[in-house]
Image (spheres, rainbow, N blue to C red):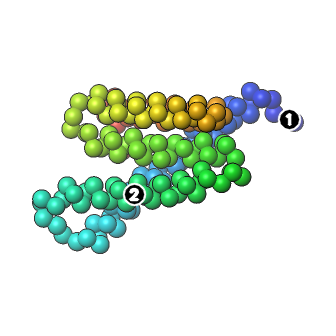
Amino acid sequence: MKLKTWQKNVLSAVVIVAGGFLLWNIAFLMAYGVMLLYNTIRGPVSQTDAIINEMVWKYIFAALVLLISSAVFLPKKIPALIKATYLTMPLMSVLIIIGIGFYEYSKWIPISIGAVIIAGTAFFIYMRKLPWLYYFATAYTGIVALIVVLFDIQI
């Protein structure tokens, strides 16, 4: 039986939702692993150096995500569904790092910054004329991140 277009689209959306959720969990575990490894290597630090050292592991994690992202997004042979699903991971990683960084401030600050990032991503997708899958992945990630902030969900 051949699937109709709408059935393929619904199936693609389900893949993005499920794959995105799985990738977010992998990213959170990867961030935790980077933090543990960094803290183990650097050893004990003074209280004044703690803030700087906390940012360093986040930069290492961001560089690792960027490296993996280039391996996913650069090859032309990887299908758009896989790339769109993967887009959820670096996008959510950025939004969560922003949320952590601005946790002590009003919740509207990380929401505003996140909205700019989501809008910028959508604009990039529009300019590159990418398929609807990328828009869906971006919207899905943005909505879930917004729900995390609004309902103060701890991750």
Q: Earlier in the sequence, mark 1 or mark 2?
A: 1
Q: Position of residue 116 (x, y in %)?
A: 40, 31
Question: What quarter of the picture does the C terminus occupy?
Answer: top left
Question: What quarter of the picture does the N terminus occupy?
Answer: top right
Tell me the residue at 12%/59% (across/down).
48
Task: Residue under label 2, please give it.
Answer: 61
Q: Position of residue 125 (x, y in %)?
A: 57, 35
Q: Position of residue 16 (x, y in %)?
A: 60, 40
Q: Amino acid at mark 1?
A: Lys
Asked which quadrant contains residue 61, the reply is bottom left
Judging depth in this view, the residue of 153 and 99 nearest the camera is 99
Task: Residue under label 1, please give it.
Answer: 2
Under circle 2, the secondary element is helix
Asked which quadrant contains residue 53, the reply is bottom left
Q: Would residue 76 be visible to someone looking at this image?
A: yes
Q: Which mark is residue 146?
A: none
Mark 1 → mark 2, Cα distance in angstroms: 42 Å
Q: Position of residue 21 (x, y in %)?
A: 52, 43
Under circle 1, the secondary element is loop
Tell me the residue at 77%/29% (across/down).
5
Tell me the residue at 29%/70% (across/down).
40
Q: Would residue 133 be visible to someone looking at this image?
A: no
Q: Amino acid at mark 2?
A: Phe
